[in-house]
Amino acid sequence: MKSIAILGTGYVGLVTGTCFADLGNKVTCIDIIEEKIRMLCQGKSPIYEPGLEELILKNVKHGKLSFTTDADRAIKNSEIVFICLPTPSLPDGHCDTSYVLGAAETIGKAIDNYKIIVNKSTCPPGTARQLENEICKYTSQLFAVATNPEFLKEGSAVIDFMKPDRVVLGTENPSVEKILRQLYEAVTINGHPITVMKRESAEMVKYASNALLAVRISFINEIAESCEHCGADIKEVVDGMTSDPRIGPHFLHAGPGYGGSCFPKDTLALVACSKDMGVSSKITEAAYIVNTEHKLYAAKKIEISIAGLEGKKIGIWGLAFKANTDDIRESPALTIVPYLIERGAHIHANDPQAMENAKRFLSPTVAYHTNLYDVCKGSDVLVLLTEWNDYKDPDFALIKKLMKTPAIVDLRNLYYRKKTDLQSLGFQYTGMGT
Ligand SMILES: NC(=O)c1ccc[n+]([C@@H]2O[C@H](COP(=O)([O-])OP(=O)(O)OC[C@H]3O[C@@H](n4cnc5c(N)ncnc54)[C@H](O)[C@@H]3O)[C@@H](O)[C@H]2O)c1
């Protein structure tokens, strides 16, 4: 059992802290938002993540998991401190490492005996070394800084943490490696590999992984656009490609473009830090540009499908950037909904979890409905934006009855296999690249 402090209790910090507690460690999660800490102390999760709230409640009850705004005390009482702080984009695309490097003062002033500091925030290569130098300014105690990039996916974060594809550790210190290997043993014992490397390499693994995944998504979306102009069908094309083991099936689903808190900012950060090094990152840059343009392409498809937007009533199913999360950061909805509103459309939206978050970013003119069928009433078109299970098998006969015009723009190709049935029911069906 290790005593752990988690600095930053967001998507990564809360999942990391809760899972480590569930694996038998004593964990204190720290955040600066008092309301968040108050909710968590009552066993309530401030974010939606399948299975998370139950685990929080269980581990709070068993005294293994606690929450505080008192960073100094939590750090003093821990052997290992995980940094799970935001690393947003700066206006020029660079990664804003100020939260992470800013933590050096808090950590340096708090440590009164040897600590291992582990950075989980996604940062450019060299940040761990910089953090180490920063902490040195505030303490003469011995400490070590390691890098441990996080690969969990929102929507399946608890499972991803408990059964990781891999754990990447950046450290050149054998005793730190030994302790972190022990900490992760419970999740790596069943064969999930733990890979140890230099800190800069670990930092680059995260950027390179996200950039490659972003490239695959942008690539297939570009091919989907081409399919629409040459009579090909992206679903058939992907089926024909992915049985090649060199290509594989993952991240080749045409859609409205990638979003979320990672791919957009991490691709931009890789491009910016490569430029600083005098290296070009043209492929990653292209993935970002294609994605930005593709979100607009998706919005225009809606406009074209109903021959103009002025005065039209549009039903939207899904606001989160993907299913099973309430996160709407960089969601395609944040490009598509404003595009539609600016051109005179009236938006009625439903999302099983993300409506509260969406309200903070979208125009107050958007009408939100907890019943998914209510958005269809009198609508000129129903747009499927997020592939939630709730939308997978709806009552299309009822939808047709409720809508003014039976038209569906399916930006996730969720109803692709039902296309003929929908057309027989009288729907005009528009997919992405099909
Ligand atoms: N969200 C993901 O799916 C994901 C996956 C892998 C890696 N990451 C990376 O992990 C890092 C964290 O991402 P996230 O999505 O969890 O962010 P988040 O915004 O959800 O959480 C960050 C938390 O840190 C808190 N915070 C800010 N300043 C603080 C301070 N000085 N002291 C204590 N708490 C403070 C915020 O209040 C917030 O609760 C980022 O670098 C991100 O790129 C995220």
Image (cartoon, rainbow, N blue to C red):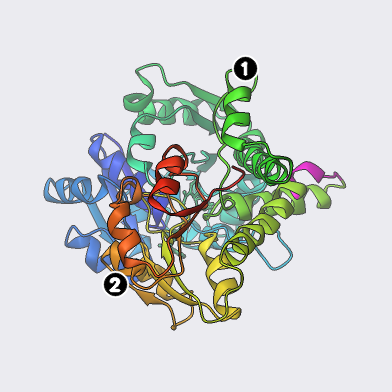
Point out residue 61 in the picture as x, y percentages from the top left corner: 12, 50
Q: Residue 273 vs residue 300: left or right? A: right
Q: Which of label 2 and label 1 is nearer to you?
A: 1
The answer to whether residue 206 is left or right of residue 73 is: right
Real-space Cα separation, disc 2 to disc 1, in angstroms: 50 Å
Give percent across and percent down for residue 238. 60, 30
Residue 35 shows which numbered tag? 2
Q: Position of residue 188 (x, y in %)?
A: 38, 23
Q: Which residue is mark 1?
A: 244
Which quarter of the image is occupied by the N terminus? Answer: top left
Q: Nearer the viewer, residue 24 or 204?
A: 204
What residue is at 59 percent from the left and 39 percent from the top? 206
Figure quadrant of residue 347: bottom left
**SS class of the residue under badge 1?**
loop
Please name the residue shown 12% across and 45% down the image: 62
Is 281 magenta? The answer is: yes
- The magenta span reads 279-285
Q: Residues within 10 Å of mark 1 (few under 14, many from 20)?
A: few
